Amino acid sequence: MADNHNSGGKIGINTHLAHIGPDPHGNQGFVNPSIQRGSTVLFPDHHTMKTESQKYTYGTHGTPTTDALCDAINQLEGSHGTLIFSSGLAAVTVPLLAFLSAGDHMLMVDSVYAPARRFCETELKRFGVETEYFDPAIGEGIEALIRPNTKLVHLEAPASNTFEMIDVGAISRVAKRHGCVVTMDNTWATPLYFRPLDHGVDISMHAATKYPSGHSDILMGLVSANKETWDQLDACNRNLGLCGSPDDAYMILRGLRTMGIRLAHHEKSALDVAHWLEARSDVLSVLHPALPSFPGHDLWKRDFKGASGVFSFVLKGEEGNTDLNRRKAAAFIDALTFFGLGYSWGGYESLAVHVYLGDRRIRKGPTDGPLIRLQIGLEDVADLKADLEKGFAAAAAVTA
């Protein structure tokens, strides 16, 4: 659980990614860190053990391998400290537990990652914490929702599945005036394309399961905090006894080396497919923040350095005809070959899912056709377009 920060200077991002984290000269010259597995750590004497006056004391409190990853993420995020968790969802829920108590009120964007909403509606509600949802377009208007007992504001940008943009800086400024902690799920952009702490956010979290891993074989969440919130967050995590695996930390470090190159490819391919979809008569709209036609494009262009490979589109259907739209979505997805049907994203492979938005309270999402979310992987774009053509043909064959 490293807590040091090095800005990395004015070097290119791919150079930075190639060199952050490990210390070869402190590791017998090996460019990659050793995988240090262990629970028990020995102390040289009674005094050292009682005062815990050595760097490592027990496996749950960090190892050289996990610290190497935390050091790397601190540099990317500009954070004071980083914690490793066993999943992206844990990375979202533990900061909420760290800063919310019975009787508190929390504001959460309505377009949030669905499992985060489920946690609020079950566990936090059971603990006596009230969650209120707000429109992602609220901006400084969030001030009207802040109460004396509002302790935390949770953001996600772009929005899950529908990709609405949020004015992170404006919301953070208002929240800070009222003493609220601001947390943000930054999984879509990663710290390469957006650094939440630079925009007033206190705690940035993301699922390293996605782009840092890049190969659909690791589950991990990362939480990076500024100096003001670090101690309380770190103490809560120690009390909960959560930690990440050194083996998984090593794999994420390995994934970081190519993340810049992979993200650039994801971005280029996804925009190619998005523009192609916009021109189709069987597509009603394309929800991608980097498209000039997207309502939140100006915010994206102002604040973000790039776009990842995940976006959605509305397949031509029939307003209000839920059954027809469901059957069209099923036919579209089942006809695909290179696009797999599965949860998550950020790996090398393309995925397609029919999005469910029934849990939304305020920002309901499209109703004029089924919403299909695409993860554009590392395949050749021509092959992906040909695959999507099969899906469109299958959906067109479905009639009332």
Image (cartoon, rainbow, N blue to C red):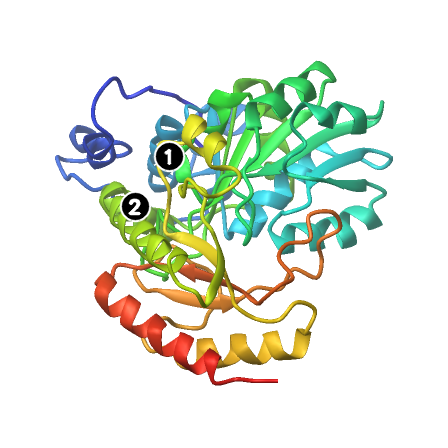
Q: Residue furthest top?
A: 177
- What is the x, y in percent for residue 262? 26, 48
**Amino acid type shown at disc 2:** Leu
Q: Secondary structure at mark 1?
A: helix
Give the CA distance from mark 1 to mark 2: 9 Å
In the rendered image, is residue 256 in sight? yes
Residue 263 falls left or right of residue 285:
left
Q: Residue furthest front?
A: 281
Residue 119 falls left or right of residue 24:
right
Indicate whether 247 appears above or below 332.
above
- What is the x, y in percent for residue 143? 75, 23
The one of 360 and 221 positioned closer to us in this rendering: 360
Q: Which residue is mark 1?
A: 193
Q: Quadrant of residue 184?
A: top right
In the rendered image, is residue 45 in sight? no
Indicate whether 400 appears above or below 71.
below
